[in-house]
Image (spheres, grey):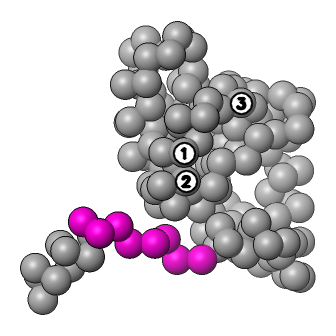
Amino acid sequence: MKIAFTTNDRVHINQHFGGAKEIDVYEINAEGYEFLETLSFDGDLKLDGNESKLEPKIEALADCKIAYVAAIGGTAAARLIKKGVTPVKARSEEEEIAEILNKLVQTLKGNPPPWLRKALQPKPQSFEDELEEEATV
């Protein structure tokens, strides 16, 4: 599964979702993890309540299961959840990406907590997706 992290140094989860210029994406499973890519965003990303900057990020994370952030607004969190992405707030901006990844690998080997089991479930199809699928059959 893919996991995203808002970061400005590739080490810590230290960026607010709305203001993040870069989001690192990893692939993770019970055997380990691998860095996939850094998603870059430009333009006016200051934290000003302007939610138009959110859409490119939300779309870019659509194939991720979890997004770790230093902070996130309620609207952005709700929109991620609607896309099937679980936002998780880091305990602090000093929390390290590798630490989280290692803990997740260990958790996946055992009995994941309910929130992680839910995040691992297939993404729910929207009504529009179901209509589109029916139209192509």
Residue type at tag 3: Ala
Reading the chain from its start, which is encountered first: label 3 or label 1? 3
Residue 11 in picture, x, y percent from top left: 78, 36
Taking the spot 52% from the left edge, 77% from the top edge, the residue there is: 122
Residue type at tag 1: Ala
Reading the chain from its start, which is encountered first: label 3 or label 2? 3
Kindly check if marks 1 and 2 are in contact, taking CB atoms under 8 A apart as contact: yes
Q: Which residue is mark 1?
A: 78
Q: Is residue 59 above or below residue 19?
A: below
Label 1 crowd bin: few (<14), some (14–19), many (20+), radius 10 Å = some
Q: Is residue 36 above or below residue 55?
A: below
Residue 7 in picture, x, y percent from top left: 68, 31
Locate residue 47: give its quadrant. top right
Q: CA distance from mark 3 to mark 2?
A: 15 Å
Kindly check if marks 3 and 2 are in contact, taking CB atoms under 8 A apart as contact: no
Locate residue 85: give its quadrant. bottom right
Taking the spot 46% from the left edge, 56% from the top edge, the residue there is: 83
Q: Mark 3 against mark 1, which lies toward the viewer?
A: 1
Residue 128 in picture, x, y percent from top left: 24, 66
Q: Which residue is mark 3?
A: 71
Main secondary-structure element of the magenta-colored stretch = loop
Q: Is residue 20 left or right of residue 125?
A: right
Label 1 sits on a secondary structure element that is helix
Residue type at tag 2: Ile
Q: Is residue 43 above or below residue 95?
A: above
Taking the spot 60% from the left edge, 35% from the top edge, the residue there is: 74
Q: Which mark is residue 81?
A: 2
Q: Which mark is residue 107?
A: none
